[in-house]
Image (spheres, helix red, strand yellow):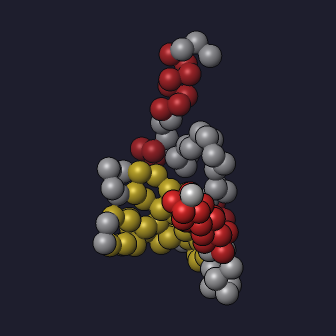
């Protein structure tokens, strides 16, 4: 019985901590994550907006590096919803179909 009480308390504390994370005193008022893309098993590229400026960051265990600062933040697309088909910006070498669109085409859908 005591073990069930302890497990229940841990679950409740975890849920409360997850909910309270958003109430950190407004420190993230001008910061928003617009999107992220895994580039390795533990590395990813993250697009963030800080005020009116957008930054592309490289995130790896123990380090975060600025990869690019965008001059024209208005040209970036809004953050995709979960399960959305993320496409690179049009033009240049990045103008190619996404994995999802190739898969759907090969399945005949």
Residue at image position (56%, 44%) is 86
13 left or right of 46 in image? right
Residue at image position (59%, 63%) is 5
Please identify the quarter of the rendering in which residue 105 is found: top right
62 left or right of 36 in image? left
> In x, y percent, where is residue 10?
55, 65
On screen, 27 above or below 7? below
Foreground residue among 33 and 91: 33
Residue at image position (46%, 66%) is 56
Regarding residue 52, the answer to whether it shows in the image is no
> In x, y percent, where is residue 27?
62, 85
> In x, y percent, where is residue 87?
55, 43
Residue at image position (46%, 52%) is 37
On screen, 11 above or below 85? below
Residue occupying the far top of the picture: 108
Which image quarter is the N terminus in?
bottom right
Regarding residue 43, the answer to whether it shows in the image is yes
Foreground residue among 51 and 25: 25
Please identify the quarter of the rendering in which residue 13 is found: bottom right
């Amino acid at each position: 019985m005591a073990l069930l009480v302890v497990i229940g308390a841990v679950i409740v504390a975890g849920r409360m901590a997850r909910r309270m994370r958003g109430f950190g005193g407004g420190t993230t008022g001008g910061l928003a994550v617009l999107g992220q893309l895994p580039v390795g098993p533990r590395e990813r590229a993250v697009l963030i907006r800080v005020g009116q400026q957008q930054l592309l960051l490289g995130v790896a265990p123990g380090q975060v590096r600025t990869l690019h600062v965008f001059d024209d933040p208005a040209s970036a697309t809004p953050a995709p919803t979960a399960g959305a088909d993320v496409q690179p910006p049009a033009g240049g070498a990045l103008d190619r179909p996404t994995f999802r669109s190739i898969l759907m085409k090969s399945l005949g859908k």
